[in-house]
Structure formats: structure tokens, C-alpha cells
Image (tube, grey):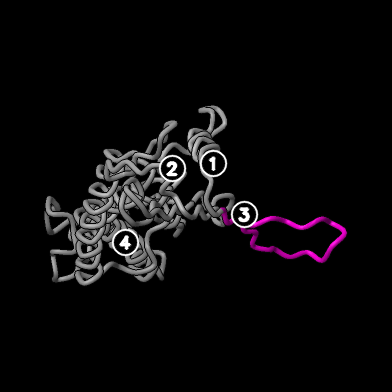
Amino acid sequence: MLLMFSVFAVMFYIDGSSGYRKKNLTFYLHKSFQTANAQFSEMNQDGTLTAAKWKEHAEQQSVEFPEDRSVLPADLEIPEPWPAILHDFDRMKPLQWNLLWTEYSGEEGLAKTPPEEAYTAQKIREQWIVFYICVGLSVVAAFILIRTLRRSISADDQGIVTQEGKRVAYSDLKVLDLRKWDTKGLAFADYEGASGKGRIRIDGLTYGGFKKEQDQPAEQLMQKIRANFSGELIEYTAVADTEPANLDAKTD
């Protein structure tokens, strides 16, 4: 969870700080290629447009950006002239602006396919909001992780030492509930006696795990407890294949 929220936080931070702004720049640059193509076609309807006249026109043009500069990269200098490739009469003449864009975007390291629409200031603010939420969740996850790493549970021949450091003698264990052990790695041990009264929550995935390459420490812990336990045992037992398939609770 910590890794997931941290990755999300980084992703939303990038989008909010620069990602969406760069995508907006790509969007408006791409649009300028379409605009240049339309203007070239209109000016050359009668076939009399010259290279000099087109270049003079193109040099006077600039990329059309929105009035809200907050949706654009902070280091962008405005006005931004049309890219030089759009000044070239011979390259514009075939009216294949999409091929020119592919070449230009590749040289400039821009996305070949721009977003379908520009990102608004509200969209960018939303990225920051989600970023702060993910940071908060990352802090919570880190706190839980650190707290969990510092906690442990163990069993010896006399009893169990709980996560809180309390020793509970096996003689005080009254009920051992293993109905969720095989499916979720959870078990519950109720105790009452000289050790006090309460319930021990044994989370196998947290305290040890079930990895075979690590000798399944959680399963070894449970085997140690069961070997010394003499109270009421509750677990699910699958019936024989010849009988109707169901699960019965067995009490020992």
C-alpha cells in the first residue's frame, strides 16, 4: 500500500507540476500545423503563392495559446513563433501537415499523438488535490508499516508472547479459532486465567508469512501453538467426496 500510494503521488505530482502543461503545449503546437495547412491551402488556391510570400506570412504567425498562461509550461516564452518547418514552402506545398508534425514532434521529443483537448486549470488543480491525498495516505501507510515491523509474536514451550509483549500461558488458552487460517492466514486465540482475559489475533501474513522458501514461519508458529494447546479447537473440515459438498464446523 505504501508503494502504491507513493507511486500514485509521484504520478499526480508530475501531471500537476509539469505533465499536463507539457501536454497542453503539444496540443497547441499540433493545432498550429493544422492552421498553417489551412492558411497555405487558402493562399495558394489560384496556384500563384510564392515561397517568398509564404515565408513572409509564416514568419509573422505565432502559435495560438489560451489567455490563461497557468495551463502552459512556466518557462514558455510567448509569443511562440510557428515552428521553422512550417516556413518551408516546398514542404508545405503537398499539404501533408500530419507528416510534418510526425517529423517535428520526433525531433522535439513531443508526443506524436496529442491529447484530444487541452487540460484546463481545474484539471491541473485536481491533480494537486489527489497528490496531497496520496501523500497523506502514504504517511498513514508508512506509519502502519513501521508499527507492524516493530511488532512480533512468538511461541515457546510455556506459552505465547503477544504483539503487545504479554505472555499468555498455554494453560490459559480456552479457544483456538482456525476457520480463517487456511484461507486468510488469520487465527484467534481466546484466553482467560492467570494471564488475564482477552483474545490474541494471529495474522500469519504479517508475522512470518507462508513462503516455502522461508520455511513458512507462520505455519511453524501455529504448529508450535497447536502442539501445546489443549482447549477448544474450531476449524473447518472438508467432508469426504462421497458426501454432499459443504463445510462443517468441528469442535474438539
Measured as percent of width and height from the top left, residue 144 is found at 27, 49
Residue segment shown in magenta: 233-252
Camera-near label (4 vs 2) is 2
User: What is the distance, in whole Å, between disc 3 and disc 4 at their CAs?
Assistant: 71 Å
For the residue pair 192 and 19, the one nearer the viewer reads as 192
Which amino acid, by three-letter code, is at mark 3? Asp
Which residue is disc 4 drawn over? 27
Say which element carries label 1. Answer: helix
Q: Residue at x 72, y 56 (%)?
A: 238
For the residue pair 43 and 191, the one nearer the viewer reads as 191
Say which element carries label 2. Answer: helix
For the residue pair 128 and 30, the one nearer the viewer reads as 128
User: What is the distance, in whole Å, between disc 4 and disc 2 at their CAs?
Assistant: 70 Å
Which amino acid, by three-letter code, is at mark 2? Tyr
Res 226 label: 1
Q: Earlier in the sequence, mark 1 or mark 2?
A: 2
Measured as percent of width and height from the top left, residue 126 is found at 23, 67
